[in-house]
Image (spheres, rainbow, N blue to C red):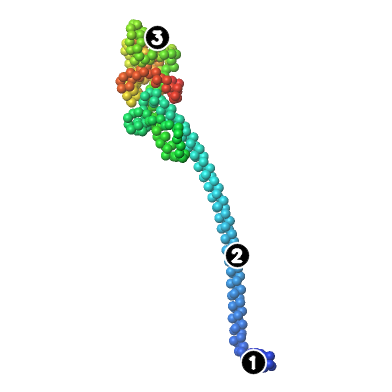
């Protein structure tokens, strides 16, 4: 059997050329070509499948990215809303604190007392800071910052600590002031004398309350004041509550503003039931009237 393959090629002029190929070689070439075709086809299919898979993954990632972008926009919107709410709340709190600060300054100004904040701003001379003139002025508006609000909170806290130890408001629900501070005709002998407190008349048994935080310095009975209580407020202020019917605190007790310390009576050198109330600063008597009237500016309970 012939193991060769004869290939005859005829030209245009009738000339023929014969190519002789070995059949095993041709078979091998064909097998090689088939293998190449199979490999190429398989690779093409695999690439197609891989490309489809990658496209699906890219599509999924793009979808996730779009969702994250939408969530990010939502979160940004929520953050902006919270910032606006915080600004509004901060402005409201700042306004309330500012109003309280002004009320405290009014109280201290009425009592001729300078807060530590104003002392520092006035160079430590004790005078109030100069008033701000808003006429013929301008400039950019600068919003409220957290620092300024914090400074105001600290100022109010310091001033409130100062107010806690100032004797403010009425110590008793008096019917009237039966005798004021200063010169008067003595009710017992009719001679001109100096009255170093105020007399607040009322019914026997009325509750007498401390007008500031402090400590009971003295309590007792003598011919002048009858049953009396003296409270030290720790800032060079002391208060005296005299002519009581009954004492409800002991020496050394700590008391708070509004705490009941006695009941109104008619003991000692007295012409009728009333409370003799004194305020002393640096051991010298001061007029209690302006301290009494401060109750209109602050909340002192029922006193």
| Nearest to the observer: residue 28 or residue 277 | 277
Instruction: Name the residue: 57% across, 51% down.
Output: 70
Instruction: Name the residue: 39% across, 33% down.
Output: 155
Element under disc 1: strand
Q: CA distance from mark 1 to mark 2?
A: 50 Å
Disc 3: which residue = 272
**Which callout, 1 or 2, points at the residue further toward the start of the chain?**
1
Q: CA distance from mark 1 to mark 3?
A: 156 Å
Residue 19 percent coordinates (x, y): 63, 91
**Which callout, 2 or 3, points at the residue further toward the start of the chain?**
2
Could you say which quadrant of the image residue 187 lies in? top left
Residue 247 percent coordinates (x, y): 37, 17
Quarter of the image with the C terminus is top left
Residue 52 is marked as: 2
Residue 18 is marked as: 1
Quarter of the image with the N terminus is bottom right
Name above or below for residue 245 compared with residue 72.
above
Residue 34 percent coordinates (x, y): 61, 79
């Amino acid at each position: 059997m012939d193991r060769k393959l004869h290939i005859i090629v005829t030209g245009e002029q009738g000339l023929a050329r014969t190519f002789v190929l070995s059949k095993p070689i041709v078979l091998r070439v064909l097998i090689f070509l088939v293998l190449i075709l199979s490999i190429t086809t398989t690779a093409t299919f695999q690439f197609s499948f891989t490309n489809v898979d990658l496209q699906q993954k890219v599509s999924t990632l793009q979808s996730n990215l779009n969702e994250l972008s939408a969530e990010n926009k939502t979160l940004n919107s929520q953050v902006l809303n919270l910032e606006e709410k915080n600004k509004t709340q901060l402005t409201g709190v700042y306004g309330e604190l500012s109003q309280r600060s002004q009320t405290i300054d009014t109280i201290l100004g009425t009592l001729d007392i300078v807060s530590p904040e104003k002392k520092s701003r006035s160079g430590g001379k004790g005078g109030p800071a100069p008033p701000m003139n808003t006429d013929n002025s301008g400039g950019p508006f600068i919003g409220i910052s957290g620092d300024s609000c914090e400074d105001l909170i600290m100022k109010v806290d310091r001033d409130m600590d100062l107010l806690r130890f100032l004797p403010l408001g009425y110590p008793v629900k008096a019917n009237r002031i039966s005798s004021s501070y200063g010169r008067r005709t003595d009710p017992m002998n009719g001679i001109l004398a100096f009255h170093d407190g105020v007399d607040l008349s009322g019914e026997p048994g009325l509750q007498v309350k401390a007008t500031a935080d402090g400590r009971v310095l003295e309590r007792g009975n003598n011919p002048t004041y009858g049953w009396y209580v003296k409270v030290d407020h720790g800032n060079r202020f002391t208060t005296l509550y005299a002519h009581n019917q009954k004492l409800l605190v002991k020496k050394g007790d700590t008391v708070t503003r509004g705490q009941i310390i006695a009941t109104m009576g008619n003991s000692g050198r007295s012409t009728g039931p009333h409370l003799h109330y004194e305020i002393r600063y640096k051991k010298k008597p001061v007029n209690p009237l302006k301290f009494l009237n401060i109750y209109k500016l602050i909340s002192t309970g029922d006193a």
